[in-house]
Amino acid sequence: MAPPDTPPAPPSSALYDLRWITRAACPADWWAHVERCGGGFFHTPPGLEAGAPAGEAVFAQLLHGQDVVGIAAGVRSRCRLGRRPRHLYFPTAPAFRGLPRPDEALGALAEALRIEGAAEVAVDSFDAGWQPDVTPGRSIETRDRVEYLVPLDRSPDELVRGCSKHHRRHLQNGIRQDWSFQTLDGPEARAVIAAVQHAAADRAAERGDPFQATLPAAAGAATDGGAPWGVTTFSVWEKGAPLAAALVGWAKPRAYYLVGGSTPTGYACHAAVWLHWRIMCHLAGAGFTTYNLGGTPATARQPDDPQHGLYRFKSGFGADIVSRRSVRWTLRPVHVATHRLVNWVATRLHS
C-alpha cells in the first residue's frame, strides 16, 4: 500500500509543456483571460466574495509557453493546525481555452497546489462550464448536483410561455398588480436581502428543512453597468414595501442567482416568480445569454425530497437542468484527519 501522502500520478505527456502559476492579487488583465477561456462570475473577485469562505485569494493561470490557456480562482484558508493557509477552495471548475484534456489539467492544478503545501483542495461546480470525469478513491471525493439554466434568447412573452402552468398563473397575476421593479445597493440592499433571507429560513425551518440565512460579503455592492463583472440586488415592491429580492452575480454573458427570498406578504402572492421573470427580461435586454437559477441536489426531483419545492420553483421557468460535479482532493491525509478530529472535539466541548 502506498504511503498516506503519496502524490497523485503524474499527468500524461499532453501536459508536459503546460504549467500552472498562482498569484495572490488579481492580475490587471484577468478579465481578458476569463473572457477568452469562457469563464464566468465565480472566476472573478466578486465571485470569490459571494461564493467562497474568507481566506487569501488565489488566481491561477495555466500557461502554454507564454499563452494563458486556463484560469481558476479560489481562496486559501488556515486551520487550527498551523499558520500556513493549507486548505484551498475554488467555487467553480477552471475554465480552459482549446484544451482537449481538462480532467488532466484539473489534476495538474491539484498537484501544483500540493507542491506549494496544500493539504486539501476542493473544486466546487457553481456555473461550471464542464463536468470533471474523476474517479472517486481513497484521496478523491466527488459530489453531484444539478443547476437550472434559462436561455435568454427570447422575448418577455416567450419567457412567460416557457414557464410551467403554475408559474404562468402567478406571472399573469403579478403583471396585473401595481408592483415596481427596482435595483438596490448599499445598506438598503443589504437590509432587504437579509430580511428576505431570514424570512425564507424561518419558512424552511417550519417545513423541517432548515438552513442558515447568509449575507454574502458582495451584497450591497453598487451596480456598474460598464464593468465586465459585478453583483446586483433586484427587488419587487408594492406601495413602498418589499415583496421579494434577489442578489445576482454576473460576468457577461452569464448571470447567476446567489441568494434571495420573499417577505411573508410576498411569499403569499408568489412575488418571487414575477421578480425572476423581470430579472430575466432585464438581463436579456442587456445582452446576457443565460440566467442560472442556482442548484439543488440531484435528488430534488423526487417528490419526497426536502428540496422538491425548490426543484419545482426553478424548473418551472422552463430551465435546462444541467448536471454538475464537485471534486475534493485530500493531499495530506494525516493533516486533514487531525484537522477534522480537532473540529469534532471542539464541537463536542461547545455543545
Image (cartoon, grey):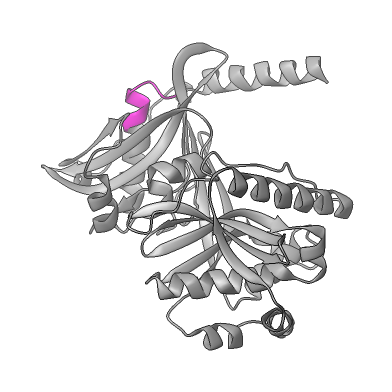
Query: In the figure, is residue 213 to the left or right of 90?
Result: right
Residue at position x 72%, y 16% in the image: 346
In the image, 188 versus 264, the foreground residue is 188
Q: Is residue 68 left or right of residue 129?
A: left
Query: Residue 160: x percent and y percent?
Result: 60, 84
Q: Is residue 340 above or below residue 60?
A: above
* 79 magenta-colored: no
Quadrant position of residue 340 = top right
Q: Residue furthest left?
A: 65
Query: Where residue 92 appears, x then y in whole percent?
Result: 45, 48
Magenta stretch, residue numbers: 112-119
Q: Closest to the observer: 17 or 30?
A: 30
Task: Inspect this view and state whether residue 259 appears.
Answer: yes
To which quarter of the image does residue 293 belong?
Answer: bottom right
Quarter of the picture containing the C terminus is top right
Point out the residue furthest to the top here: 82
Which residue is nearer to you in this view: 121 or 168?
168
Horizontally, residue 86 falls left or right of residue 96, namely right
As rendered, which of 40 and 71 lies closer to the eye? 40
Q: Is residue 9 visible?
A: no
The residue positioned 37% from the left and 65% from the top of the image is 253
Q: Position of residue 28 (x, y in %)?
A: 23, 40
Give the residue at x 83% y 68%: 268
Percent position of residue 310, x then y? 71, 63
Determine if the magenta segment contains residue 117.
yes
Q: Which residue is at a point 11% across and 42% down the rendered structure image?
A: 66
